[in-house]
Amino acid sequence: MLSVSALCASYGAIRAVDTLDLEVAPARLVTILGANGAGKSTTLRSIAGLHRPIAGSIRLDGVEIGRLPTHRVVQRGVALVPEGRMVVAPLTVAENLSLSAFAGRGVEGDMLARVYDLFPRLAERRSQVAGLLSGGEQQMLAIGRAMMTRPRLLLLDEPSMGLAPAIVDQVFSAIVALHRDGQSILLVEQNAEITLEICDYAYVMRRGRIVAAGTPESLRAAGAVLEAYLA
C-alpha cells in the first residue's frame, strides 16, 4: 500500500502541493483529477523521488521512501510513466525495454513477453528507433519501460495527452488489463470521463490540496469533479 500523508512538495522555490493525504491499496486503480496547475504531476514526481517532501511522509508497504534517491524508489517497486513519455530516442524499442529491465526485480524474458502482449505494435516495431515512433507508440513504449521494472506501484502521468482517440482507447485498454491482473496504479489524467469509468477510487485536487475524494459514483453524485475543474 502507498500512503502519502501531509506532504508538502516543492518545485524550485514554488510550493506546489500542500497538506496532501492519499492512499493506494494493493491491486487498486486510483486516480487524481484536477485542472492544470493543481499539483497532480508534482504529487507523482514526489512519490517517484524526483522532488523531496518538505514535511510529512511517503510510505510504501509501511516503509518510508520519501527521502530515498529516485533509483532506490524504483528498486522498492515504484515506476513513473512521466508526462511527455521521455523514451530514449536513439535506442530501439527493444533496447529501451532492455535498459529498463536493469532496474527490475526478476527475469527480463517473461516481462518482455507481457509488454509485447499488451502492446503488439511494440513487438512489430522492436527494431525501430524510439525517436521515429508515433506519439501513441512512444506512450506504449513508456508504459512498457515502466513495466519492465516489475513495479508494485505504477504511476501514470497524463497517458492520453496528445493522442488520437483510437490510440487513447488502446492505451486505456492496456491500463484496464494491468489493473485486472492485480497491478496497483495511481493515475493522473485530464480526461475525467474515461478515468471515472475505470478507476476504483478518485481524488480531486485544486491548488495543491485534495478537495474531494470517493468512489466514481459518489463524486459524480456530488458534482465535485465539475466544481473543481471550473474553480
Image (cartoon, helix red, strand yellow):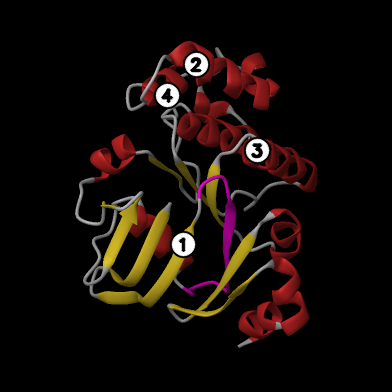
Mark 2 → mark 4, Cα distance in angstroms: 12 Å
Q: Nearer the viewer, residue 196 or 134?
A: 196
Dot 4 falls on a residue whose secondary structure is loop
Local packing at callout 3 (Cα closer than 10 Å; few below 14, some 14-19, many 20+) is: many
Left or right? Give the position of 184 relative to 103.
Answer: right
Residue receiving disc 1: 23
Kindly identify the amino acid type of the residue bearing the numbered disc 2.
Ala
Q: Position of residue 229 (x, y in %)?
A: 64, 79
Kindly identify the amino acid type of the residue bearing the numbered disc 1.
Glu
Examine the residues drawn in magenta and state their main secondary structure.
Answer: loop
- Total labels: the figure holds 4
Examine the image and state in which quarter residue 22 appears. bottom left
Q: Quick check: marks 4 and 1 in contact, CB under 8 Å?
A: no
Q: Position of residue 61 (x, y in %)?
A: 36, 49
Residue receiving disc 2: 94
Dot 2 falls on a residue whose secondary structure is helix
What residue is shown at x 72% (from left), y 83% (from top)? Answer: 222
Q: Position of residue 196 (x, y in %)?
A: 71, 62
Query: Which numbered dot is residue 136?
Result: 3
Q: Is residue 35 magenta?
A: yes
Mark 3 → mark 2, Cα distance in angstroms: 17 Å
Q: Quick check: marks 3 and 2 in contact, CB under 8 Å?
A: no
Examine the image and state in which quarter residue 55 appears. bottom left
Q: Nearer the viewer, mark 4 or mark 1?
A: 1
Mark 1 → mark 3, Cα distance in angstroms: 30 Å
Judge whether 118 appears above or below 175 on screen. Answer: above
Mark 4 → mark 1, Cα distance in angstroms: 37 Å
Q: Nearer the viewer, mark 2 or mark 4?
A: 2
Q: Quick check: marks 1 and 2 in contact, CB under 8 Å?
A: no
Region rendered in magenta: 26-38
Mark 3 → mark 4, Cα distance in angstroms: 17 Å
Residue sitting farthest toward the bottom: 231
